[in-house]
Image: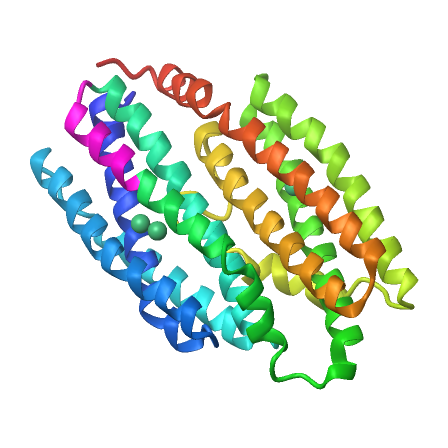
Amino acid sequence: MPDSVQEQLTKHLTDVHSIEEQALTQLRRAPGIAGDEELAQVFDRHLIETEEQERRVRERLAARGADPSTIKDLAGRAGGFGMVLFARSQPDTPGKLTAHAYSYEHLELAAYDLLALVAQRAGDPETAGVAREIREQESAMADRLAANFDQAVEASLRKLEPDDLEGQLTSYLADAHAIEAQSLQLLRQAPAIAGDSNLAKVFRDHDEETQAQQAIVTARLEAHDAKPSRFKDVLLRVGGVNLGVFFGVQPDTPAKLAGFAFAFEHLEIAAYELLRRVARRAGDEETVRVAARIAVEERAAATAIRMQFEPAVEAALRAQGATA
Ligand SMILES: [Fe+2]
Ligand SMILES: [Fe+2]
Ligand SMILES: [Fe+2]
């Protein structure tokens, strides 16, 4: 039975509700592990906003005669714990926390972009309006996190001996390598989901670019007599991305794939922003240059993916035979 656009909209609302449940779990614990007063306040402030967002989404569900999904919300909370545990387990907890939070805010941003598009199609301007307002809050939170990348690096390195900078730099390079490995895995699955679309072309182009990026990172590791870490390559693949049940480990529709990939590009952007700062402290100007250049490429990829949100939603609604 094809879903109607009305059913799709209600489903999207239960999805974003679970995303907010995951955000709440993360934000309640983030200040305690942020390692920096200013950064902790950024999380505290967004916790209050997020409580309001959760309530507003629940109200929109109620207005449509629906409830949040217990199962999705549970999965969201579990994902939130997973993210916090992952950040805690890392030697550079504040950096990892900030990078993942930055990516998570972009996941939310994408989810509300998609929600607004579906609500528009379903003729529900109230929900579309709420989606756009919350999206702006997520976007502003992401900007505040980006403004605190310096503090995150500072807090991560504070406890280390000065002569450990070299070790930190190679560790951040190995992280970047692992993230690129994960990116390649995602991009390889993408064409099967994205089908014959402009979105598929965006993914194919970025696949090529990603291989080049990974080679550059490997060369920087070699310049420091280091190698990619098999352990990290596997660990990050498993635990590094808790980007929410909405998109899942294997997103099944082009729209969800696009949203997930958009958030993933922002995990990469954050990783290179942090790497750039660590490299500067370590006096490795070549890595500073390379990290800045790759970050520009990741931003361009994220923008190209976001431009496909609308066509992807349209295609999804068409494919499901959804009618108003
Ligand atoms: Fe939120
Ligand atoms: Fe948020
Ligand atoms: Fe990328």
Position in image of residue 72 (x %, y %): 29, 51
Indicate yes or no whether the magenta region holds residue 125: yes
Regarding residue 92, the answer to whether it shows in the image is: no
Q: Considering depth in this image, is 137 or 232 the residue closer to the camera?
A: 137
Q: Is residue 144 positioned above or below 196 on the image?
A: below
Give the left or right position of residue 178, taking residue 200 as reference: right
Position in image of residue 304 (x %, y %): 57, 27
Task: Look at the image and name its color scheme.
Answer: rainbow
Number of numbered labels in the structure image: 0
Indicate yes or no whether the magenta region holds residue 169: no
Q: Is residue 224 positioned above or below 201 on the image?
A: below
Secondary structure character of the magenta stretch overall: helix
Position in image of residue 178 (x %, y %): 70, 57
Q: Is residue 285 positioned above or below 313 on the image?
A: below
Q: Considering depth in this image, is 159 or 118 the residue closer to the camera?
A: 159
Q: For residue 114, what is the image quadrant?
A: top left
Q: Is residue 6 positioned above or below 65 on the image?
A: above
**Residue stretch in magenta:** 123-134
The residue shown at (19%, 31%) is 127
The quarter of the rendered structure image containing the C terminus is top left
Give the left or right position of residue 101, taking residue 299 as reference: left
Position in image of residue 5 (x %, y %): 25, 21
Regarding residue 85, the answer to whether it shows in the image is: yes
Q: For residue 175, what is the image quadrant?
A: bottom right
The residue shown at (90%, 61%) is 222
The quarter of the rendered structure image containing the N terminus is top left
The residue shown at (44%, 49%) is 142
The residue shown at (57%, 63%) is 150
